[in-house]
Amino acid sequence: MNRSGYNQASARSESPLSQNTQEEQNLQHEKSITLKELAEFLEVTDEAITPEDGSCCSVKSDQQKITRSIRGSVSKKFPNPPAELNKDLQIHLQNVQETIYSELLKLRPVLESMGQFKCLVDCYHRRTFDHLNDLLQDVRLSSVKNSFVLMKWVLHSYLSQDLLCHPDLQEMDLLKKVDLLLFTDWVAKAKDKLLENVQTEIRQSLEKILQNERNQRGFDREEDCVQLYVDTSQCIDAMPKVAQTISSKLSDHVREVCFQELLEFLGRYNDEQTKILESEAKKDKPETKHFLKTLNTCKQLKQHVQTSGKGVSTLLFQETVGMLEDMEAFTLNLLMGIVTDTAEFHLKKNFKKENKEFSLLILAVKEYFPVKFCQNIQEAVIDEAYKHIVHIYLKHLIRRSRSKLEQSWSHDVGQTVADDAEHLHSTIKDMAPGVQQWNLMLQIIPELLEDKEINSVKMTVGKMQEECPTWSSDMELVPALLRWKGQSGRDVMEVLDALPEDKPKPRYKPWYSALSCCTGEG
Protein backbone atom coordinates (compact mmCIF):
# COMPACT_ATOMS: atom_id res chain seq x y z
CA MET A 1 0.00 0.00 0.00
CA ASN A 2 1.46 3.39 -1.04
CA ARG A 3 1.66 6.47 1.18
CA SER A 4 -1.18 8.27 -0.67
CA GLY A 5 -3.43 5.36 0.23
CA TYR A 6 -2.74 5.89 3.89
CA ASN A 7 -3.29 9.64 3.52
CA GLN A 8 -6.63 9.01 1.81
CA ALA A 9 -7.59 6.60 4.57
CA SER A 10 -6.61 9.14 7.14
CA ALA A 11 -8.61 11.90 5.41
CA ARG A 12 -11.70 9.74 5.26
CA SER A 13 -11.40 8.97 8.95
CA GLU A 14 -11.05 12.59 10.05
CA SER A 15 -14.66 13.49 9.13
CA PRO A 16 -16.91 10.92 10.84
CA LEU A 17 -20.43 11.74 11.86
CA SER A 18 -20.47 13.53 15.18
CA GLN A 19 -22.69 10.86 16.70
CA ASN A 20 -20.24 8.02 15.85
CA THR A 21 -18.55 6.37 18.75
CA GLN A 22 -14.77 5.84 18.84
CA GLU A 23 -15.32 2.16 18.14
CA GLU A 24 -17.31 3.00 14.97
CA GLN A 25 -14.51 5.33 13.87
CA ASN A 26 -11.94 2.59 14.35
CA LEU A 27 -14.00 0.13 12.34
CA GLN A 28 -14.15 2.65 9.49
CA HIS A 29 -10.37 2.81 9.47
CA GLU A 30 -10.13 -0.98 9.61
CA LYS A 31 -12.35 -1.22 6.57
CA SER A 32 -10.39 1.46 4.71
CA ILE A 33 -7.13 -0.44 5.29
CA THR A 34 -7.47 -4.08 4.37
CA LEU A 35 -5.95 -6.80 6.48
CA LYS A 36 -3.67 -7.67 3.60
CA GLU A 37 -2.46 -4.08 3.34
CA LEU A 38 -1.91 -4.00 7.12
CA ALA A 39 0.08 -7.23 6.95
CA GLU A 40 2.26 -5.76 4.19
CA PHE A 41 2.79 -2.60 6.22
CA LEU A 42 3.71 -4.62 9.31
CA GLU A 43 5.93 -6.83 7.14
CA VAL A 44 4.23 -10.06 8.20
CA THR A 45 2.98 -12.92 6.01
CA ASP A 46 -0.59 -14.07 5.67
CA GLU A 47 0.22 -16.98 7.98
CA ALA A 48 0.71 -14.50 10.77
CA ILE A 49 -2.96 -13.56 10.66
CA THR A 50 -4.44 -16.92 9.63
CA PRO A 51 -5.42 -19.41 12.35
CA GLU A 52 -3.28 -22.51 12.63
CA ASP A 53 -6.17 -24.80 11.58
CA GLY A 54 -6.81 -22.69 8.46
CA SER A 55 -10.47 -22.09 9.25
CA CYS A 56 -12.00 -18.66 9.00
CA CYS A 57 -14.47 -19.23 11.76
CA SER A 58 -11.65 -19.67 14.28
CA VAL A 59 -11.04 -15.94 14.07
CA LYS A 60 -14.04 -14.30 15.63
CA SER A 61 -13.49 -10.73 14.49
CA ASP A 62 -11.36 -8.37 12.48
CA GLN A 63 -9.88 -7.07 15.73
CA GLN A 64 -8.42 -10.49 16.48
CA LYS A 65 -6.87 -10.54 13.01
CA ILE A 66 -5.38 -7.10 13.54
CA THR A 67 -4.00 -8.10 16.92
CA ARG A 68 -2.52 -11.24 15.35
CA SER A 69 -0.84 -9.10 12.68
CA ILE A 70 0.65 -6.77 15.28
CA ARG A 71 1.88 -9.68 17.35
CA GLY A 72 3.43 -11.22 14.27
CA SER A 73 5.26 -7.99 13.53
CA VAL A 74 6.52 -7.75 17.10
CA SER A 75 7.67 -11.35 17.07
CA LYS A 76 9.48 -10.87 13.76
CA LYS A 77 11.21 -7.61 14.65
CA PHE A 78 12.11 -8.48 18.26
CA PRO A 79 15.88 -9.24 18.42
CA ASN A 80 16.95 -12.81 19.08
CA PRO A 81 19.59 -13.45 21.75
CA PRO A 82 23.17 -13.52 20.42
CA ALA A 83 25.18 -16.74 20.40
CA GLU A 84 27.49 -15.43 23.12
CA LEU A 85 24.74 -14.08 25.33
CA ASN A 86 26.85 -14.06 28.49
CA LYS A 87 29.39 -11.84 26.77
CA ASP A 88 27.02 -9.67 24.75
CA LEU A 89 24.05 -9.25 27.12
CA GLN A 90 24.41 -5.48 27.38
CA ILE A 91 24.60 -5.14 23.59
CA HIS A 92 21.55 -7.35 23.21
CA LEU A 93 19.49 -5.25 25.60
CA GLN A 94 20.56 -2.14 23.73
CA ASN A 95 19.36 -3.75 20.49
CA VAL A 96 16.02 -4.55 22.14
CA GLN A 97 15.73 -0.96 23.30
CA GLU A 98 16.56 0.52 19.89
CA THR A 99 14.22 -1.88 18.09
CA ILE A 100 11.24 -1.06 20.31
CA TYR A 101 11.91 2.65 20.02
CA SER A 102 12.26 2.66 16.24
CA GLU A 103 9.24 0.38 15.67
CA LEU A 104 6.99 2.47 17.90
CA LEU A 105 7.97 5.62 16.03
CA LYS A 106 7.62 4.00 12.60
CA LEU A 107 4.28 2.29 13.16
CA ARG A 108 2.66 4.94 15.31
CA PRO A 109 1.03 7.14 12.61
CA VAL A 110 -0.90 4.35 10.91
CA LEU A 111 -1.76 2.30 13.97
CA GLU A 112 -2.75 5.38 15.93
CA SER A 113 -5.09 6.41 13.11
CA MET A 114 -6.61 2.94 13.38
CA GLY A 115 -6.85 3.13 17.16
CA GLN A 116 -4.42 0.18 17.40
CA PHE A 117 -1.29 1.88 18.74
CA LYS A 118 -2.10 0.84 22.33
CA CYS A 119 -2.22 -2.75 21.09
CA LEU A 120 1.26 -2.35 19.58
CA VAL A 121 2.66 -0.91 22.82
CA ASP A 122 1.05 -3.71 24.84
CA CYS A 123 2.44 -6.38 22.51
CA TYR A 124 5.98 -5.03 22.74
CA HIS A 125 5.61 -4.66 26.49
CA ARG A 126 4.48 -8.27 26.92
CA ARG A 127 7.03 -9.60 24.44
CA THR A 128 9.77 -7.75 26.30
CA PHE A 129 8.89 -9.22 29.67
CA ASP A 130 8.37 -12.70 28.25
CA HIS A 131 11.88 -12.38 26.88
CA LEU A 132 13.23 -11.02 30.17
CA ASN A 133 11.68 -13.98 32.00
CA ASP A 134 13.45 -16.31 29.59
CA LEU A 135 16.72 -14.50 30.23
CA LEU A 136 16.29 -14.92 33.98
CA GLN A 137 16.11 -18.70 33.51
CA ASP A 138 18.96 -18.90 30.96
CA VAL A 139 21.83 -20.81 32.58
CA ARG A 140 24.29 -18.74 30.57
CA LEU A 141 23.26 -15.71 32.62
CA SER A 142 23.38 -17.32 36.07
CA SER A 143 25.77 -14.80 37.54
CA VAL A 144 25.51 -11.77 39.77
CA LYS A 145 27.00 -9.60 37.05
CA ASN A 146 24.30 -10.50 34.52
CA SER A 147 21.53 -10.21 37.11
CA PHE A 148 22.71 -6.67 37.80
CA VAL A 149 22.80 -5.89 34.06
CA LEU A 150 19.22 -7.09 33.58
CA MET A 151 17.83 -5.25 36.60
CA LYS A 152 19.67 -2.07 35.79
CA TRP A 153 18.31 -2.08 32.24
CA VAL A 154 14.72 -2.70 33.34
CA LEU A 155 14.77 -0.22 36.22
CA HIS A 156 16.93 2.50 34.68
CA SER A 157 16.41 2.20 30.92
CA TYR A 158 13.10 0.57 30.07
CA LEU A 159 10.86 2.90 32.07
CA SER A 160 13.07 5.94 31.63
CA GLN A 161 13.69 8.57 28.97
CA ASP A 162 15.79 5.97 27.19
CA LEU A 163 12.64 4.18 26.06
CA LEU A 164 9.03 4.39 27.29
CA CYS A 165 9.49 7.95 28.54
CA HIS A 166 11.66 9.02 25.61
CA PRO A 167 11.02 12.66 24.58
CA ASP A 168 9.91 11.51 21.11
CA LEU A 169 7.28 9.28 22.74
CA GLN A 170 6.43 11.42 25.73
CA GLU A 171 3.18 12.85 24.37
CA MET A 172 1.83 9.29 24.02
CA ASP A 173 2.17 8.72 27.77
CA LEU A 174 3.15 5.09 27.26
CA LEU A 175 3.28 4.26 30.97
CA LYS A 176 -0.52 4.47 30.98
CA LYS A 177 -0.72 2.03 28.07
CA VAL A 178 1.31 -0.82 29.61
CA ASP A 179 0.54 -3.35 32.30
CA LEU A 180 2.87 -2.35 35.14
CA LEU A 181 2.11 -5.57 37.00
CA LEU A 182 4.27 -7.35 34.43
CA PHE A 183 7.06 -5.00 35.45
CA THR A 184 6.60 -5.45 39.21
CA ASP A 185 6.26 -9.24 38.92
CA TRP A 186 9.45 -9.47 36.89
CA VAL A 187 11.37 -7.23 39.29
CA ALA A 188 10.36 -9.51 42.19
CA LYS A 189 11.54 -12.59 40.28
CA ALA A 190 14.75 -10.85 39.23
CA LYS A 191 15.48 -9.83 42.81
CA ASP A 192 15.05 -13.42 43.99
CA LYS A 193 17.31 -14.67 41.19
CA LEU A 194 19.90 -12.03 41.99
CA LEU A 195 19.95 -12.93 45.68
CA GLU A 196 20.28 -16.60 44.78
CA ASN A 197 23.30 -15.79 42.60
CA VAL A 198 24.75 -13.50 45.29
CA GLN A 199 24.52 -16.29 47.85
CA THR A 200 26.25 -18.77 45.55
CA GLU A 201 29.07 -16.46 44.49
CA ILE A 202 29.73 -14.97 47.94
CA ARG A 203 29.88 -18.46 49.45
CA GLN A 204 32.36 -19.57 46.79
CA SER A 205 34.49 -16.46 47.22
CA LEU A 206 34.61 -16.75 51.01
CA GLU A 207 35.49 -20.43 50.79
CA LYS A 208 38.35 -19.52 48.45
CA ILE A 209 39.56 -16.93 50.98
CA LEU A 210 39.44 -19.55 53.72
CA GLN A 211 41.32 -22.01 51.52
CA ASN A 212 44.03 -19.41 50.92
CA GLU A 213 44.26 -18.99 54.68
CA ARG A 214 44.70 -22.74 55.12
CA ASN A 215 47.45 -22.80 52.53
CA GLN A 216 49.38 -19.90 54.00
CA ARG A 217 52.80 -20.84 55.28
CA GLY A 218 54.50 -18.52 57.73
CA PHE A 219 53.95 -14.85 58.48
CA ASP A 220 56.98 -13.09 57.07
CA ARG A 221 55.31 -9.90 55.90
CA GLU A 222 53.08 -7.37 57.59
CA GLU A 223 50.59 -7.89 54.74
CA ASP A 224 50.08 -11.44 56.02
CA CYS A 225 48.55 -9.96 59.15
CA VAL A 226 45.77 -8.16 57.26
CA GLN A 227 45.23 -10.27 54.14
CA LEU A 228 42.27 -12.28 55.43
CA TYR A 229 40.49 -9.19 56.73
CA VAL A 230 41.11 -7.20 53.53
CA ASP A 231 39.93 -10.01 51.24
CA THR A 232 36.85 -10.74 53.35
CA SER A 233 35.74 -7.13 53.72
CA GLN A 234 36.17 -6.45 50.01
CA CYS A 235 34.20 -9.59 49.21
CA ILE A 236 31.15 -8.67 51.29
CA ASP A 237 31.23 -4.99 50.25
CA ALA A 238 31.48 -5.30 46.47
CA MET A 239 27.99 -6.52 45.58
CA PRO A 240 26.00 -4.19 47.86
CA LYS A 241 27.91 -1.27 46.31
CA VAL A 242 26.88 -2.32 42.79
CA ALA A 243 23.30 -2.88 43.96
CA GLN A 244 23.29 0.64 45.43
CA THR A 245 23.65 2.05 41.89
CA ILE A 246 20.35 0.38 41.07
CA SER A 247 18.34 0.73 44.28
CA SER A 248 19.15 1.41 47.92
CA LYS A 249 16.50 -1.12 48.95
CA LEU A 250 18.03 -3.73 46.67
CA SER A 251 21.41 -2.97 48.21
CA ASP A 252 19.98 -3.74 51.67
CA HIS A 253 18.70 -7.11 50.45
CA VAL A 254 22.07 -7.97 48.90
CA ARG A 255 23.94 -6.90 52.03
CA GLU A 256 21.69 -9.11 54.16
CA VAL A 257 22.61 -12.15 52.05
CA CYS A 258 26.31 -11.21 52.18
CA PHE A 259 26.17 -10.97 55.97
CA GLN A 260 24.37 -14.31 56.21
CA GLU A 261 27.22 -15.90 54.26
CA LEU A 262 29.76 -13.99 56.34
CA LEU A 263 28.27 -15.48 59.50
CA GLU A 264 28.58 -18.98 58.05
CA PHE A 265 32.14 -18.22 56.99
CA LEU A 266 33.04 -16.97 60.46
CA GLY A 267 31.67 -20.16 61.99
CA ARG A 268 34.00 -22.26 59.82
CA TYR A 269 36.90 -19.88 60.40
CA ASN A 270 36.42 -19.93 64.18
CA ASP A 271 36.25 -23.73 64.28
CA GLU A 272 39.48 -24.07 62.31
CA GLN A 273 41.32 -21.34 64.21
CA THR A 274 40.26 -22.81 67.55
CA LYS A 275 41.95 -26.10 66.69
CA ILE A 276 45.05 -24.39 65.34
CA LEU A 277 45.48 -22.06 68.31
CA GLU A 278 44.79 -24.73 70.91
CA SER A 279 47.43 -26.92 69.28
CA GLU A 280 49.88 -24.02 69.14
CA ALA A 281 49.30 -23.12 72.79
CA LYS A 282 50.37 -26.61 73.86
CA LYS A 283 53.81 -26.29 72.27
CA ASP A 284 56.87 -25.62 74.41
CA LYS A 285 57.52 -22.44 72.46
CA PRO A 286 54.24 -21.25 70.90
CA GLU A 287 54.39 -18.97 67.87
CA THR A 288 52.45 -15.87 68.92
CA LYS A 289 52.02 -14.63 65.35
CA HIS A 290 49.13 -17.06 64.90
CA PHE A 291 47.34 -15.47 67.85
CA LEU A 292 48.15 -11.92 66.81
CA LYS A 293 46.83 -12.43 63.30
CA THR A 294 43.60 -13.97 64.59
CA LEU A 295 43.12 -11.11 67.05
CA ASN A 296 43.73 -8.56 64.32
CA THR A 297 41.35 -10.29 61.91
CA CYS A 298 38.57 -10.40 64.50
CA LYS A 299 39.10 -6.80 65.56
CA GLN A 300 39.20 -5.40 62.02
CA LEU A 301 36.24 -7.44 60.82
CA LYS A 302 34.21 -6.43 63.87
CA GLN A 303 34.91 -2.76 63.20
CA HIS A 304 34.01 -3.25 59.55
CA VAL A 305 30.75 -5.02 60.40
CA GLN A 306 29.80 -2.28 62.86
CA THR A 307 30.44 0.33 60.17
CA SER A 308 28.97 -1.35 57.10
CA GLY A 309 26.22 -3.40 58.77
CA LYS A 310 23.59 -0.66 58.67
CA GLY A 311 20.41 -2.07 57.16
CA VAL A 312 21.23 -5.64 58.21
CA SER A 313 18.67 -7.30 60.47
CA THR A 314 19.39 -6.76 64.16
CA LEU A 315 19.68 -10.45 65.04
CA LEU A 316 22.10 -11.16 62.19
CA PHE A 317 24.18 -8.11 63.08
CA GLN A 318 24.36 -9.11 66.75
CA GLU A 319 25.23 -12.73 65.95
CA THR A 320 28.04 -11.64 63.63
CA VAL A 321 29.57 -9.18 66.09
CA GLY A 322 29.10 -11.66 68.93
CA MET A 323 30.89 -14.42 67.05
CA LEU A 324 33.86 -12.15 66.35
CA GLU A 325 33.98 -10.98 69.97
CA ASP A 326 33.85 -14.57 71.22
CA MET A 327 36.75 -15.57 68.98
CA GLU A 328 38.69 -12.50 69.99
CA ALA A 329 38.18 -13.25 73.70
CA PHE A 330 39.05 -16.93 73.23
CA THR A 331 42.27 -16.07 71.41
CA LEU A 332 43.34 -13.47 73.97
CA ASN A 333 42.59 -15.86 76.83
CA LEU A 334 44.73 -18.56 75.22
CA LEU A 335 47.55 -16.10 74.70
CA MET A 336 47.33 -14.75 78.24
CA GLY A 337 47.29 -18.36 79.43
CA ILE A 338 50.66 -18.84 77.77
CA VAL A 339 52.01 -15.70 79.43
CA THR A 340 50.52 -16.70 82.79
CA ASP A 341 52.00 -20.21 82.66
CA THR A 342 55.42 -18.78 81.81
CA ALA A 343 55.19 -16.16 84.55
CA GLU A 344 54.02 -18.73 87.10
CA PHE A 345 56.86 -21.08 86.19
CA HIS A 346 59.61 -18.47 86.60
CA LEU A 347 58.17 -16.48 89.50
CA LYS A 348 57.47 -19.56 91.58
CA LYS A 349 61.22 -20.24 91.48
CA ASN A 350 62.14 -16.56 91.68
CA PHE A 351 60.96 -16.17 95.26
CA LYS A 352 62.84 -19.27 96.40
CA LYS A 353 66.20 -18.46 94.83
CA GLU A 354 68.48 -15.49 94.40
CA ASN A 355 66.11 -13.54 92.18
CA LYS A 356 67.69 -14.88 88.98
CA GLU A 357 64.49 -16.30 87.54
CA PHE A 358 62.99 -12.85 87.05
CA SER A 359 65.54 -12.07 84.35
CA LEU A 360 64.71 -15.39 82.70
CA LEU A 361 61.04 -14.41 82.72
CA ILE A 362 61.88 -11.13 81.00
CA LEU A 363 63.83 -13.01 78.33
CA ALA A 364 60.95 -15.44 77.81
CA VAL A 365 58.47 -12.59 77.31
CA LYS A 366 60.77 -10.95 74.77
CA GLU A 367 61.07 -14.24 72.89
CA TYR A 368 57.31 -14.41 72.50
CA PHE A 369 57.38 -11.13 70.56
CA PRO A 370 60.75 -11.11 68.75
CA VAL A 371 59.63 -8.87 65.86
CA LYS A 372 56.89 -6.35 65.29
CA PHE A 373 53.88 -8.05 63.72
CA CYS A 374 50.33 -6.69 63.62
CA GLN A 375 51.88 -3.86 65.60
CA ASN A 376 48.78 -2.30 67.16
CA ILE A 377 47.47 -5.68 68.23
CA GLN A 378 50.88 -6.75 69.47
CA GLU A 379 51.23 -3.67 71.64
CA ALA A 380 47.76 -4.23 73.11
CA VAL A 381 48.63 -7.87 73.88
CA ILE A 382 51.95 -6.92 75.48
CA ASP A 383 50.12 -4.31 77.53
CA GLU A 384 47.71 -6.97 78.78
CA ALA A 385 50.57 -9.40 79.45
CA TYR A 386 52.29 -6.69 81.49
CA LYS A 387 49.25 -6.46 83.81
CA HIS A 388 49.14 -10.23 84.23
CA ILE A 389 52.82 -10.45 85.13
CA VAL A 390 52.55 -7.70 87.74
CA HIS A 391 49.57 -9.42 89.36
CA ILE A 392 51.31 -12.81 89.41
CA TYR A 393 54.46 -11.22 90.84
CA LEU A 394 52.47 -9.62 93.65
CA LYS A 395 50.63 -12.87 94.33
CA HIS A 396 53.88 -14.86 94.67
CA LEU A 397 55.50 -12.12 96.71
CA ILE A 398 52.91 -12.30 99.49
CA ARG A 399 53.05 -16.09 99.53
CA ARG A 400 56.69 -16.06 100.58
CA SER A 401 57.45 -14.69 104.04
CA ARG A 402 59.60 -11.57 104.23
CA SER A 403 62.14 -13.24 106.45
CA LYS A 404 62.75 -16.08 104.00
CA LEU A 405 62.92 -13.63 101.09
CA GLU A 406 65.59 -11.66 102.93
CA GLN A 407 67.53 -14.88 103.41
CA SER A 408 67.14 -15.92 99.77
CA TRP A 409 67.83 -12.55 98.21
CA SER A 410 70.45 -11.38 100.74
CA HIS A 411 69.42 -7.75 100.37
CA ASP A 412 66.58 -5.31 100.92
CA VAL A 413 63.31 -6.88 99.77
CA GLY A 414 61.56 -3.58 99.07
CA GLN A 415 64.39 -2.35 96.87
CA THR A 416 64.53 -5.65 95.01
CA VAL A 417 60.80 -5.43 94.27
CA ALA A 418 61.26 -1.85 93.05
CA ASP A 419 64.19 -2.88 90.83
CA ASP A 420 62.18 -5.74 89.35
CA ALA A 421 59.28 -3.38 88.70
CA GLU A 422 61.54 -0.93 86.89
CA HIS A 423 63.26 -3.68 84.90
CA LEU A 424 59.90 -5.07 83.80
CA HIS A 425 58.56 -1.67 82.78
CA SER A 426 61.63 -0.63 80.80
CA THR A 427 61.66 -3.96 78.95
CA ILE A 428 57.97 -3.83 78.14
CA LYS A 429 58.18 -0.21 77.05
CA ASP A 430 60.97 -1.06 74.60
CA MET A 431 58.70 -3.71 73.10
CA ALA A 432 55.54 -1.59 73.10
CA PRO A 433 56.22 2.13 73.62
CA GLY A 434 52.58 3.01 74.22
CA VAL A 435 51.99 0.75 77.23
CA GLN A 436 50.56 2.10 80.45
CA GLN A 437 52.63 1.95 83.62
CA TRP A 438 51.09 -1.08 85.30
CA ASN A 439 53.89 -1.59 87.85
CA LEU A 440 52.90 1.14 90.33
CA MET A 441 51.66 -1.34 92.95
CA LEU A 442 55.11 -2.91 93.01
CA GLN A 443 56.87 0.45 93.05
CA ILE A 444 54.94 1.55 96.13
CA ILE A 445 55.84 -1.56 98.14
CA PRO A 446 59.23 -0.16 99.40
CA GLU A 447 57.37 2.85 100.73
CA LEU A 448 54.82 0.59 102.40
CA LEU A 449 57.56 -1.48 104.06
CA GLU A 450 59.17 1.66 105.46
CA ASP A 451 55.92 2.81 107.11
CA LYS A 452 56.06 2.26 110.90
CA GLU A 453 52.96 4.13 112.00
CA ILE A 454 49.46 2.95 111.20
CA ASN A 455 48.53 6.38 109.83
CA SER A 456 51.44 6.20 107.38
CA VAL A 457 50.24 2.79 106.26
CA LYS A 458 46.76 4.22 105.71
CA MET A 459 48.19 7.00 103.56
CA THR A 460 50.29 4.61 101.48
CA VAL A 461 47.40 2.22 100.86
CA GLY A 462 45.23 5.23 100.02
CA LYS A 463 47.87 6.22 97.50
CA MET A 464 47.65 2.76 95.94
CA GLN A 465 43.90 3.08 95.66
CA GLU A 466 44.18 6.54 94.09
CA GLU A 467 47.12 6.10 91.71
CA CYS A 468 47.50 2.44 90.74
CA PRO A 469 45.70 1.52 87.48
CA THR A 470 45.70 -2.15 88.53
CA TRP A 471 43.89 -1.43 91.81
CA SER A 472 40.60 -3.04 90.73
CA SER A 473 42.30 -6.35 89.90
CA ASP A 474 44.97 -6.26 92.67
CA MET A 475 43.01 -4.82 95.59
CA GLU A 476 41.90 -8.23 96.89
CA LEU A 477 45.58 -8.99 97.51
CA VAL A 478 46.02 -5.88 99.67
CA PRO A 479 44.85 -7.45 102.97
CA ALA A 480 47.34 -10.31 102.50
CA LEU A 481 50.01 -7.78 101.49
CA LEU A 482 49.48 -5.92 104.77
CA ARG A 483 49.68 -9.15 106.75
CA TRP A 484 52.84 -10.08 104.81
CA LYS A 485 54.29 -6.71 105.83
CA GLY A 486 53.61 -7.61 109.44
CA GLN A 487 50.42 -5.72 110.25
CA SER A 488 47.96 -7.36 112.63
CA GLY A 489 44.46 -8.34 111.59
CA ARG A 490 43.10 -5.38 113.55
CA ASP A 491 45.52 -3.04 111.75
CA VAL A 492 44.40 -4.42 108.41
CA MET A 493 40.76 -3.76 109.21
CA GLU A 494 41.57 -0.23 110.39
CA VAL A 495 43.53 0.55 107.21
CA LEU A 496 40.79 -0.76 104.94
CA ASP A 497 38.07 1.05 106.87
CA ALA A 498 39.98 4.29 106.34
CA LEU A 499 39.79 3.99 102.53
CA PRO A 500 37.21 6.23 100.81
CA GLU A 501 33.85 4.58 100.25
CA ASP A 502 33.29 6.17 96.84
CA LYS A 503 35.96 3.93 95.26
CA PRO A 504 36.38 0.15 95.14
CA LYS A 505 37.95 -1.26 98.28
CA PRO A 506 38.90 -4.80 99.29
CA ARG A 507 37.03 -6.95 101.76
CA TYR A 508 39.02 -8.34 104.64
CA LYS A 509 38.78 -12.05 105.36
CA PRO A 510 41.17 -12.85 108.26
CA TRP A 511 41.32 -16.60 107.56
CA TYR A 512 41.93 -16.02 103.85
CA SER A 513 44.55 -13.35 104.50
CA ALA A 514 46.44 -15.56 106.88
CA LEU A 515 46.25 -18.47 104.47
CA SER A 516 47.40 -16.35 101.51
CA CYS A 517 50.62 -15.26 103.14
CA CYS A 518 51.46 -18.63 104.62
CA THR A 519 50.44 -21.29 102.08
CA GLY A 520 52.86 -23.75 100.65
CA GLU A 521 55.74 -21.46 99.94
CA GLY A 522 56.12 -19.66 103.28
Image (spheres, rainbow, N blue to C red):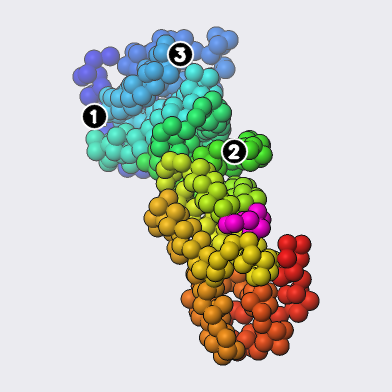
Front residue (pair 126, 520): 520
The amino acid type, in three-letter code, at marker 3 is Ala
Residue, x 39% and y 18% (percent of image)?
87
Relative image position of residue 110 (x, y in whole percent): 30, 26
Q: In the rendered structure, which segment of residues is drawn in magenta?
A: 348-355
Q: Give the number of the mark in front: 2 or 3.
A: 2
Above or below: residue 363 compared with residue 290: below
Q: Give the number of the mark in front: 1 or 3.
A: 3
| Residue that mark 3 sits on | 48
| The label number, if any, that marks residue 11 in the structure image | 1
Q: Quadrant of residue 502?
A: bottom right
The amino acid type, in three-letter code, at marker 2 is Lys
- For label 1, the SS is helix
Residue, x 46% and y 41% (percent of image)?
370
* Discs 2, 3 touching: Cβ within 8 Å: no
Residue 119 visible to an observer of this rendering: no
Q: Residues within 10 Å of mark 2 (few under 14, many from 20)?
A: few
| Earlier-in-chain disc, 2 versus 3 | 3
| The label number, if any, that marks residue 285 in the structure image | 2
Residue 509 visible to an observer of this rendering: yes
- For label 3, the SS is helix
The amino acid type, in three-letter code, at marker 1 is Ala
Q: Is residue 342 magenta?
A: no
> Marks 1/3: CA distance?
29 Å
